[in-house]
Amino acid sequence: MGSFTTFHTSSTLHCNGFSSKSVFPKFYPQHRTCPGRKKGPKVVAYYGMKKPPYNLDALEPYMSQKTLESHWGEHQRGYLDALNRHLSRSDVLYGYTMDELVKVTYNYGNPMPEFNDAAQVWNHEFFWDSMQPGGGDSPKLGLLKQIEKDFGSFANFKEKLTEAAMTLFGSGWVWLVLKKNEKRLAIVKTSNAITPIVWDDIPIICIDVWEHAYYLDYKNDRAKYVNVFMNHLVSWHAATARIARAQSFVNLGEPKIPIA
């Protein structure tokens, strides 16, 4: 039966370096130079703002354009700008993908200064991709069977996910993840910027339960927001594609998740 867990971390810097025994890969900054080119001003590429996969008014009436303009256009932009300011002070982390940057700066539960902003950018991009116009309803075929296998029924899964969202204290995220080692789906709660990729879980969907995600549309009614997300916004098409890709790394056996 599915379960959920909340995780918290400290912000103290871990100073012992990265162990080769960690689940995190060891990456190195990539510096690109052109042979024979005269030395000139240093050019460094930082991260750009990724748009949601739909127009900002496409989720109405369940999530307003005003919310997207504030949440994506201001809050996520703020995290991205803060991250790029961090990175401009040193080239130590230059060349990482966003996934790699999040994992490395998590630093075994002792986040580096760049972590919160990097993780919040990653989380928000994943959140936008977890929704679609005309979303909600229920998953189909193999994904539905996998949920029924791990949670007993789809109704029980929705109840557990809603309970997780309503009982998460303060700000954070609720995730449906695939646990690689246990080969099962689980609901995970994370506080603040923490994201389950730092534990090598594979996220399938997520819901943002920071208050700025729903205040403009639902005031402080988190329960109504979560209900609307599950019934009208969540993208089971995206979830099916994600778990199909995950089966490249995790053999779930039966039921098979069909690839569209």
Image: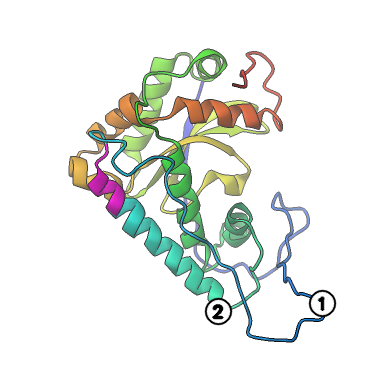
Please name which of the two marks, 2 or 1, marks the residue nearer to the observer.
Answer: 1
Q: Position of residue 163 (x, y in %)?
A: 35, 30
Q: Position of residue 136 (x, y in %)?
A: 36, 24
Residue 220 showing in the rendered view: no
Question: Sequence-wise, which precedes: disc 2 or disc 1?
Answer: 1
Amino acid at dot 2: Arg
Above/below status of 178 relative to 101: above
- In reply to whether residue 134 is colored magenta, the answer given is no
The residue indicated by pointer 1 is 35
Above/below status of 148 relative to 212: above
Q: Which mark is residue 89?
A: 2
- In reply to whether residue 64 is colored magenta, the answer given is yes
Magenta stretch bounds:
63-69
In this rendering, would 84 be left or right of 15? Answer: left
What is the number of callouts on the image?
2
Secondary element type, mark 1? loop
